[in-house]
Amino acid sequence: MITLNSERGLVRIASWDDIESVPGFTADIDPKTVKLKEIIGSYTFDALIPCGLSTCHQPHGNGFLVAAADGRVTNIGRICGKKHFDVEFTQMSRVFLAAVRAQQNREFLGELKHRLPNITAEVAAFKAGEWGAAWINTRINQLTGKSGSLPTPIVNAVRQAVRRGDGALTIQRAATKEEREALAAAADVTGLERRNRISDFVEVQVGQLDGFAALAPGNGLRDVLGAIEPFLATLSEAEIDNLPDKQLRELSKAGSELEPNLERLRTVIGAGKRLLVQQNVQQLSQFATSSAESRLFATFLRDLPN
């Protein structure tokens, strides 16, 4: 692939034949008698291209297209460029590569800006509606104890499921004699060692929360939307062609994170909707320790869809 930096912006060419037909192109320039004017392109090929310097002609796969002061154009590799044109070539290559990166950033941001109405509409759709992002976020905060409105035993059960990392709801109960003996046999211990190492309790799974990902650390919808909406607002107002290099780099970097953040938003919204249904959350009612806690949790349940 060949990338030319022209007055029209970046031009990408797939064929080396197109370069050889460029006015002034020559495959044989004496580096001792030529003065470089600028670097006008770069190339990367699997097939090797002979260097255009008469003192080299060594085949290589990566190099630059250079324009000489006399109007001729040829191709040279980075090593030859530094060897024969020293600091001048190094400075020119930096200017060229910076210009290419800037133009690539502008093209990337321009494509995103073209998609902006659809992206904005998708985000708005996630936020709106009876069971949108704000509704989901509020109830997840209740389940995880951030709002302090649900009974502590139920919140603790949710937190334990979060710590486990698998959404399993578990309880501890006294181990039966048979279970203690089985544990001892499995551990191959007896006597004092057995009393010290074998627990009198066993952990039993009593439920499984669907949509558990919505509860996981880092999946708060406020955080997810906070990584998306400011960028969309900035991109909407940005005059991409007039952005200084620093702002262009920063906005392009933020743009590269947009699609992962959108996918994260889709995942968390989907998980939240699977989580926050009565049949799923009803599993937590077994952790209530009093009738008052049961009534409080029942009020929470009634607000969830069937």
Image: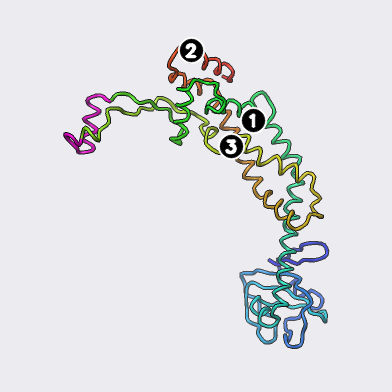
Along the line of sight, the residue nearer the viewer: 78 or 23:
78
Q: Residues within 10 Å of mark 3 (few under 14, many from 20)?
A: some
Seen in the image, is 106 located left or right of residue 140? Answer: right
Q: Position of residue 241 (x, y in %)?
A: 81, 55
Task: Kindly report the distance in space between the C-alpha atoms of the residues bearing marks 2 and 1.
Answer: 30 Å
Residue 248 placement (x, y as % from top left): 74, 54
Instruction: For mark 3, give the secondary structure.
Output: helix
Q: Are marks 3 and 2 in contact (CB under 8 Å)?
A: no
- Residue found at x 43% / y 19%: 286
Quadrant that contains the N terminus: bottom right
Q: In the shown orientation, is residue 190 left or right of residue 301?
A: left
Q: Which residues are magenta?
A: 175-193
**Nearest to viewer (mark 2 / mark 1):** 2
Per the rendering, the mark at residue 292 is: 2
Label 1 residue SS: helix
Crowding at dot 2, Cα within 10 Å, few <14 / some 14-19 / many 20+, comes out as few
Residue of label 3: 267
Q: Are marks 3 and 1 in contact (CB under 8 Å)?
A: no
Magenta segment, prevailing SS (helix, strand or loop): helix
Using the image, tell me which numbered label, if any, was put on residue 142. none
State the residue in front, 278 or 136. 136
Residue corresponding to mark 1: 133
Name the residue rendered at 23%, 38% in the picture. Answer: 187
Three-letter amino acid code at disc 3?
Answer: Thr
